[in-house]
Image: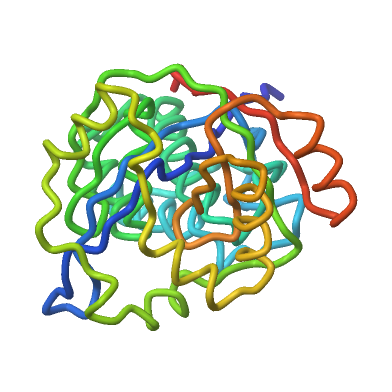
């Protein structure tokens, strides 16, 4: 039996601004998605459709299962593939592991089945189950607008990124529910953010959603303050709980994280998709 093995990369949000509330209850955002080389490992083999993960996520709750169910509906035939996901990307950390799994599996399953759908159709399916999933079809670096699903490719960046993940899972829904008018940046423009990236002024990046997460989850706030105390620019990824800085792991960060029981990941930009 043939087995296909693929990697599914994580992302960080190099910046995230809340632009305004939408009529559908969601928020319009401006964000900088950036893929990193912390990857889930996925195996696909022949067999009845089944999705299993190393963390025991129930199949019916798995975004990949929801996406493949929609793919089956569009194709009008069963997908005879069994998928196992070895989760190395922490769950509930704002690193997009589930969204990445959706895009990575959809693309590979479509390939195995003879590419019956275009990439645009796959992106449509992915975006229906996760606003972040369309980014992972292109990877690299991209501006995300709207709900994060309207994408504009940005020249690739090659960065060292150190992640610290405290022992807490953050709920995107709960963090967004705490957004107030004062958290909005309605005048932020894509060109402003592109200028920051082009000029390497990473100290000007911010995550307004991450600031809320730091207030709601003391564990996240503790990581941010720890890094800032060391003179590092700390950014929350998405709605947390992962906090990162641009740069290599230092002995002080490593020792402090170990003392507090935080997970540490040394990563680089992921350019291959």
Residue at coordinates 20% horizontally, 32% vertically from top-left? 194
Residue 35 is left or right of residue 24, and the answer is right
Which picture quadrant has residue 214? bottom right
Residue at coordinates 67% horizontally, 25% vertically from top-left? 3
Residue at coordinates 14% horizontally, 52% vertically from top-left? 188
Establish if 71 lies above or below 20.
above
Establish if 253 lies above or below 115.
below
The one of 154 and 216 positioned closer to us in this rendering:
216
Which picture quadrant has residue 217? bottom right
Residue 160 is left or right of residue 218, and the answer is left
Which picture quadrant has residue 59? bottom right
Q: Which residue lies furthest to the right in this view?
A: 259
Residue at coordinates 41% horizontally, 30% vertically from top-left? 113
User: Coloring scheme of the render?
Assistant: rainbow
For the N terminus, the image quarter is: top right
The one of 260 and 11 positioned closer to us in this rendering:
260
Location of residue 80 in the rendering, given as x and y in whole percent from the top left corner:
54, 42
Give the number of marks: 0
Location of residue 173 in the rendering, given as x and y in whole percent from the top left corner:
43, 76
Location of residue 111 in the rendering, given as x and y in whole percent from the top left corner:
40, 25
Location of residue 9 in the rendering, given as x and y in whole percent from the top left corner:
54, 33
For the C terminus, the image quarter is: top left
């Amino acid at each position: 039996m043939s087995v296909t093995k693929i990697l599914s990369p994580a992302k960080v949000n190099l910046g995230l601004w809340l632009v305004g509330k939408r009529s559908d209850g969601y928020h319009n955002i401006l964000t900088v998605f950036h893929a990193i080389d912390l990857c889930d490992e996925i195996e696909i083999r022949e067999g009845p459709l089944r999705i299993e993960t190393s963390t025991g996520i129930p199949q019916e709750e798995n975004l990949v299962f929801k996406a493949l169910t929609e793919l089956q509906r569009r194709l009008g035939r069963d997908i005879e593939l069994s998928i196992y996901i070895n989760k190395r990307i922490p769950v509930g950390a704002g690193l997009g592991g589930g969204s990445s799994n959706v895009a990575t599996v959809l693309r590979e399953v479509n390939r195995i089945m003879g590419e019956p759908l275009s990439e645009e159709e796959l992106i449509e399916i992915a975006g229906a189950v996760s606003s972040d999933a369309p980014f992972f079809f292109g990877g690299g670096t991209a501006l995300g607008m709207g709900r994060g699903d309207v994408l504009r490719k940005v020249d690739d960046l090659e960065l060292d990124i150190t992640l610290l993940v405290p022992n807490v899972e953050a709920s995107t829904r709960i963090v967004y529910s705490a957004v107030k008018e004062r958290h909005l940046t309605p005048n932020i423009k894509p060109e402003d953010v592109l200028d920051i990236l082009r000029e390497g002024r990473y100290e000007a990046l911010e995550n307004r959603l991450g600031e809320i997460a730091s207030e709601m989850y003391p564990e996240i706030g503790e990581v941010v303050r720890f890094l800032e105390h060391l003179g590092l620019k700390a950014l929350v990824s998405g709605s947390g709980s992962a906090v990162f800085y641009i740069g290599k792991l230092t002995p002080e960060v490593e020792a402090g994280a170990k003392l507090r029981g935080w997970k540490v990941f040394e990563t680089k930009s992921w350019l291959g998709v």
